Structures are given as C-alpha cells and as structure tokens.
Image: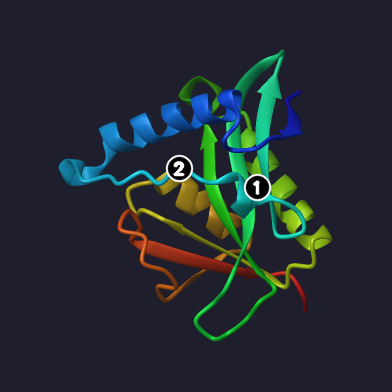
C-alpha cells in the first residue's frame, strides 16, 4: 500500500517526478502547446498548502498538492488541487482516488470551505475521478492555458 510524504516541490525527488509529469503531459497534449509551470515551495506550505509525494516500496510513484487560492468572488478559504499525477504503470489501482482523498482531508484540516481544480478535457480518466469524487464543473476561475475544464467541490454543508 502506498504512503504519503510531505515534500517541497523544489526538492530534488519531487522535482524529478514533476519533470516526468510535465514531459508526459507535453507528449500527449493536443497541438503540442503545453506550457508547464513548476510549482514553488512557497505556494505549498502550511497553513496555505501542502505538496505530497506518493511512495510505494521506496519509489516515488506520484504526487499532488493543494494551495490556497483567491477566487474571483473574493473567497479566501478555497484551496486548489494541483499537479495530481501517477506514473502510468501504477494507474488502475485506485491510487488516484487515494491521493485525491488525502489532499481533500488535508485541505479540510487547513480550513478549506471548498476545493477547485482545472484540467484538460482529454484527461478523461481524471475528469471521471473528479466527478465521481463530488466535483462539479464550474466556469473558468483562472487563466491556465492548459485547462479546458474547471471543477469545484464544496466541503462545508
């Protein structure tokens, strides 16, 4: 069973998995216009965020993070899910759901009222995971040039 480890996205091991993530996204991105933006450590530090590495048998197999974001409506208790990635050979084991659930749990502990995320419509498995996890499609909330869909999940009733 995989485990989670908090890491700076600028640490060598985290950066290495992000390099792999961005390379895969660029290779699969329609039109070849993918624009990677490497996360900074400052954006993923408590109490405003966390970056996690997913490890299995001592090997990093994925990553993901949450960070507090300002929303167009002025909300300040919204966290954004970023850089959710599993190495292709690990997919289909339920680890994407495990990672998403852990990010949500940590966001709740940091006081999040809602989660948001963006994705590309070609990432069908990711969209399916997000919808099945309670996210609903919303209007664009950021200017990510790689995104075509935006989602939100309310954490407080």
At label 2, counting other C-alpha atoms closer than 10 Å, the crowd grade (few under 14, some 14-19, many 20 or more) is few
Secondary structure under badge 2? loop
Picture coordinates of residue 100, whole percent (x, y): 65, 47
Which residue: 49% across, 81% down?
A: 72
Q: Nearer the viewer, mark 2 or mark 1?
A: 2
Question: Hey, which residue is sitting farthest bottom in the picture?
Answer: 73
Picture coordinates of residue 74, whole percent (x, y): 58, 84
Picture coordinates of residue 78, whole percent (x, y): 65, 70
Residue named by callout 1: 100
Residue named by callout 2: 38
Picture coordinates of residue 63, whole percent (x, y): 59, 35
Secondary structure under badge 1? helix
Which residue: 71% across, 14% down?
A: 58
At label 1, counting other C-alpha atoms closer than 10 Å, the crowd grade (few under 14, some 14-19, many 20 or more) is some
Question: In the rendered view, would you say 41 is above or below 67?
Answer: above
Question: Hey, which residue is sitting farthest front in the picture?
Answer: 42
Pick whichever, 38 or 93, lies toward us: 38
Pick whichever, 138 or 60, lies toward us: 60
Mark 2–mark 1 Cα distance, whole angstroms, equals 20 Å
The mark total stands at: 2
């Amino acid at each position: 069973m995989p485990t989670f480890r908090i890491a700076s996205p600028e640490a060598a091991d985290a950066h290495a998995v992000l390099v792999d993530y961005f390379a895969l996204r660029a290779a699969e991105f329609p039109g070849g216009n993918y624009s990677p933006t490497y996360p900074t450590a400052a954006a993923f530090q408590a109490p405003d965020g966390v970056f996690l590495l997913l490890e299995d048998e001592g090997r990093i197999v994925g990553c993901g993070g949450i960070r507090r974001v300002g929303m167009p409506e002025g909300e300040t208790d919204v966290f954004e899910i970023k850089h959710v990635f599993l190495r292709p050979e690990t997919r289909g084991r339920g680890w994407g759901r495990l990672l998403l659930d852990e990010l949500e749990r940590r966001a709740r502990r940091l006081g999040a009222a809602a989660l948001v995320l963006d994705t590309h419509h070609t990432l069908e498995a990711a969209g399916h995971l997000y919808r099945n996890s309670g996210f609903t499609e919303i209007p664009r909330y950021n200017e990510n040039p790689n995104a075509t869909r935006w989602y939100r999940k309310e954490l407080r009733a």
